[in-house]
Image (cartoon, rainbow, N blue to C red):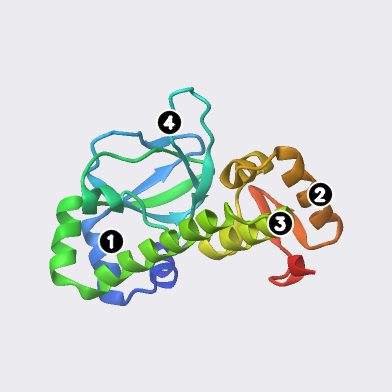
């Protein structure tokens, strides 16, 4: 794996910014299960995923934590605490073996002040996250349960860099505030119809338009 090429192709950046990131940042290799950040921990770096899948665990009072395995290459995180202040927003753990480029907030500020391409890179990641969150918010009002699940799967496949849907039935049900049985029945039927395929960490759409039938 060529980390330089992965950064360029995933984050749509040029050679100069790629070199700047590699010279200023630190590559962290995370084995499956290792935590990278903890909720409310003082935030000092943004994290730029290079390979693998990470999950975030919002800690809630009743202790019923759910892992949302939605951080993949192309989705920068810990950028919000840099912009708005505060600590890390959730526990973040490697769901698979991962490589992440950590860039200190001091270097982030330097690049924000001097490099339009870096600002564009951050904006693209923020836009992806915002569109995904707005899609989920809008789906809360969708009355057709099958359409609701279908559109959520499509939204997840669009936000991940390679079209993966790295969630299980429980996580998808939690995202949509639906019962596991309803989501599970839809997933089983979609797999039987060859519209959805199982993958190592979740599912993958067989075809973009398949679920619309």
Q: Earlier in the sequence, mark 2 or mark 4?
A: 4
Q: Which mark is residue 22?
A: 1
According to the picture, the residue beneath numbered tag 4 turns out to be: 59
Q: Secondary structure at mark 4?
A: loop
Mark in the foreground, 4 or 1? 4
Please tell me which residue is depicted at 39% across the width and 38% down the height of the picture.
90
Instruction: Count neighbours of disc 3 (C-alpha within 10 A) and say few if under 14, some if 14 to 19, many if 20 or more.
Output: few
> What's the residue at 36%, 51% (across, down)?
77
Q: Nearer the viewer, residue 159 or 93?
A: 159
Q: Is residue 74 visible?
A: no
Looking at the image, is 74 positioned above or below residue 29? Answer: below
Q: Earlier in the sequence, mark 4 or mark 1?
A: 1
Residue 3, located in which quarter of the rendered image? bottom left
Residue occupying image coordinates x 29% and y 72%: 120
* Distance Cα–Cα, label 4 vs label 1: 32 Å
Q: Residue drawn 22% across and 74% down?
A: 116
How far apart are the two marked residues, 4 and 3, measured between alpha carbons? Answer: 30 Å
Q: Does residue 24 appear left or right of residue 93 in this picture?
A: left
Residue 105 - label: none
Q: From the viewer's perspective, is residue 61 above or below residue 43?
A: above
* Residue ranking furthest to the top: 62
- Nearer to the camera, 7 or 137: 137
Which type of secondary structure does the marked residue at label 2 adopt? helix
Measured in 3D between alpha carbons, the distance from the residue under mark 1 to the one under mark 3, in whole angstroms, is 47 Å
What is the spatial separation of the Cα atoms under label 2 and label 4, in whole angstroms? 30 Å
Choose the circle earlier in sequence order: 1 or 2.
1
- Where is residue 42 shown, x and y percent of the image? 23, 36
| Residue that carries the numbered disc 2 in the rendered image | 188
Where is mark 3, residue-wise?
Answer: 144
């Amino acid at each position: 794996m060529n980390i330089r090429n992965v950064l360029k192709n995933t984050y749509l950046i040029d050679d100069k910014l790629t070199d700047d990131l590699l010279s200023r940042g630190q590559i962290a290799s995370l084995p499956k299960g290792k935590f990278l950040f903890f909720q409310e921990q003082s935030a000092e770096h943004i994290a730029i995923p290079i390979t693998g899948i990470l999950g975030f665990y919002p800690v809630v009072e009743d202790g019923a934590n759910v892992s949302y395995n939605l951080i993949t290459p192309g989705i920068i995180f810990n950028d919000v605490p840099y912009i708005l202040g505060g600590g890390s927003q959730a526990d973040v753990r490697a769901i698979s073996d991962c490589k992440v480029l950590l860039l200190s907030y001091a270097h982030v500020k330097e690049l924000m002040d001097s490099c339009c391409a870096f600002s564009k890179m951050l904006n693209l990641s923020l836009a992806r996250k915002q569109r995904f969150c707005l899609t989920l918010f809008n789906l809360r009002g969708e009355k057709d349960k099958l359409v609701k699940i279908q559109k959520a799967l499509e939204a997840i496949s669009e936000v991940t860099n390679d079209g993966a849907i790295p969630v299980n039935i429980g996580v998808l049900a939690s995202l949509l505030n639906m019962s596991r049985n309803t989501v599970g029945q839809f997933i089983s039927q979609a797999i039987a119809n060859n519209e959805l395929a199982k993958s190592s960490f979740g599912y993958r759409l067989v075809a973009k338009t398949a679920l619309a039938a």
